[in-house]
Amino acid sequence: MSTETKTTDLQVIISHCKEYGFIFPSSEIYDGLGAVYDYGPYGIELKKNIQEYWWKSMVQLHENIVGLDAAIFMHPKTWKASGHVDAFSDPMIDNKDSKKRYRADVLIEDAMAKIEDKISKEADKAHKKFGDAFDRAMFLKTNPNVLRNQEKINTIEARFKAALEANDMADLKQLIIDLEIVCPISGTRNWTDVRQFNLMFSTQVGSVAEESDTIYLRPETAQGIFVNFLNVLNTSRQRIPFGIAQVGKAFRNEIVARQFIFRTREFEQMEMQFFVRPGTEMEWYEYWKNARIAWHRTLGFADSDLKFHDHIKLAFYANAAVDIEYNFPFGFKEIEGIHSRTDYDLKQHQEFSGKRLQYFDPELNESYVPYVIETSIGLNRTFLAVMSNSYKVEKLEDGSERSVLSIPPFLAPIKVAVLPLMKKDGLPEKAREIMNELKYDHMCFYDEKDSIGKRYRRQDALGTPFCITIDHDSLTDNKVTIRDRDTMKQERVSVSELRAIVAQKVDWRRY
Ligand code: ATP
């Protein structure tokens, strides 16, 4: 059996998601709505399992983290206080020929990534030439071509950072022109000026469209946590340092929504705000950086597919920020952000609401506005990472192929498929008995249609870790065959052992 490496073709993942009921385009019978997706029968199970795993890892395993479920609609002053009304925007630029709109910062980042790509290709080439004796680190430090390209990146990055910090849209445009960036559709450099574009969706509450009735769909879940800081503090018996976790929908009118569920206008965030004593925030920032990347490894992501990426420009409220990037089919991109948000948010809400949002620290015998470390991960992006990481096409010994999702068993949408070998002779009845026993513990799937080989393939494509087959002998020896998704090995076991075998393999404690 040979295993292909991870696919770099996003289309393959999109097709698999559609064909096997994970993700459908939204309102497809009306030809779909751009960049909006619905989760099908197996997609919802996987999404729920990822969410639940995050929740358990953060809330259940930490005595000092509690949960919250704040509403999507919030008082409009929230977004004035948080700075979103004035500053939650992305720089956009249009190509006059194709009429396509782009994020100016993304165009520049992509141009830098292309140069980085050249560097890594240069190193790969040298590696091939020199073989095992090749010292990559030394090569990157000394090769003239690499140094020249690295210098180019540094110069672009410095200028890019300065333009963003000064909010200098004219220089961002100039940078795009100087880098000779062309529109991928029209191939021209006929650009408009760069303009800031606010990403918040607004809507009207009630029937009269007056300005005071304008409210926003939340662009992040975090503010629901900040405005509830006192409520949670007063009811949960928590003492600093402690965290509040929340999972929920967020909405951003992204200039360019693309790459399947990677960037959509409606998405789900899993966020945790950790409140700490001022002056200790860097310690906690380091702590959560390490804890969060370790969590990603438990999803089965290889070290080489994960990396930290420090922010080029810090948000105005942050004193440190890093992204955890995953190697998606389209390259390394952000999956989670870890931000040291200082006391900015609580102080702003204190000022705008007139309510004292402070903590009395009995050890110091003083009150203060806590500092905050935020961990913010996209549920949909994690879903896409799990899918991309698990999807494989394997060549089997008999020459045939199977597509398999090697999803970690504790996240798999279906844990067990129960399959009577034939649809007669009392086998379905025996299979139903087993199904009825296991379904209270796990998501199970009963299937008696098609050949057993076809049924195995279907479960492989859904990522089901176990198939249990009931044959004629089962009726007399009370034993069944249990097949492992990854090794395809089959073992005959007693029906009485099934619960323990499955429970052991899908136990999230093992990861
Ligand atoms: P990006 O730079 O990709 O726009 P961001 O830095 O604005 O992301 P944050 O505000 O830090 O993102 O949000 C935290 C997390 O929420 C991100 O790491 C990502 O996983 C998720 N997220 C943000 N925007 C989107 C989106 N439009 N679609 C899906 N997930 C998103």
Image (cartoon, helix red, strand yellow):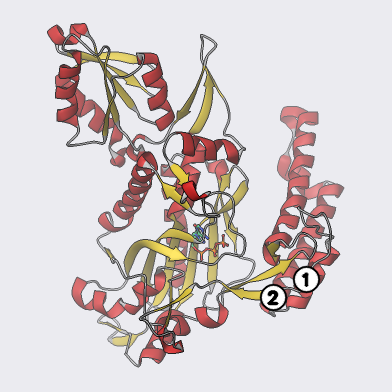
Is 397 on the left or on the right of 228, as rendered? Answer: right
Identify the residue under disc 1: 192
Residue 42 visible somewhere in the drawing: yes
Residue 486 visible somewhere in the drawing: no
The quarter of the rendered structure image containing the C terminus is top left
Is 188 on the left or on the right of 417, as rendered? Answer: right
Decide: marks 2, 1 in contact (CB < 8 A)? yes
- Crowding at mark 2 (Cα within 10 Å: few <14, some 14-19, many 20+): some
Labels in figure, total: 2
Whether residue 278 is situated above or below residue 395 in the rendered picture? below
**Residue positioned most to the front:** 30
Quarter where residue 60 is shown: bottom left
Name which residue lies at 39% across and 15% down: 453
Give the image location of residue 317, x and y in percent: 52, 78
Q: Nearer the viewer, residue 415 or 447?
A: 447
Three-letter amino acid code at the position of disc 1: Thr
Three-letter amino acid code at the position of disc 2: Arg
Check disc 1 and report its element: helix, strand or loop: loop
Give the image location of residue 239, x and y in percent: 26, 73
Whether residue 355 is situated above or below residue 141 in the rendered picture? below
Identify the residue under disc 2: 195
**Residue positioned most to the bottom:** 354
Check disc 2 and report its element: helix, strand or loop: strand
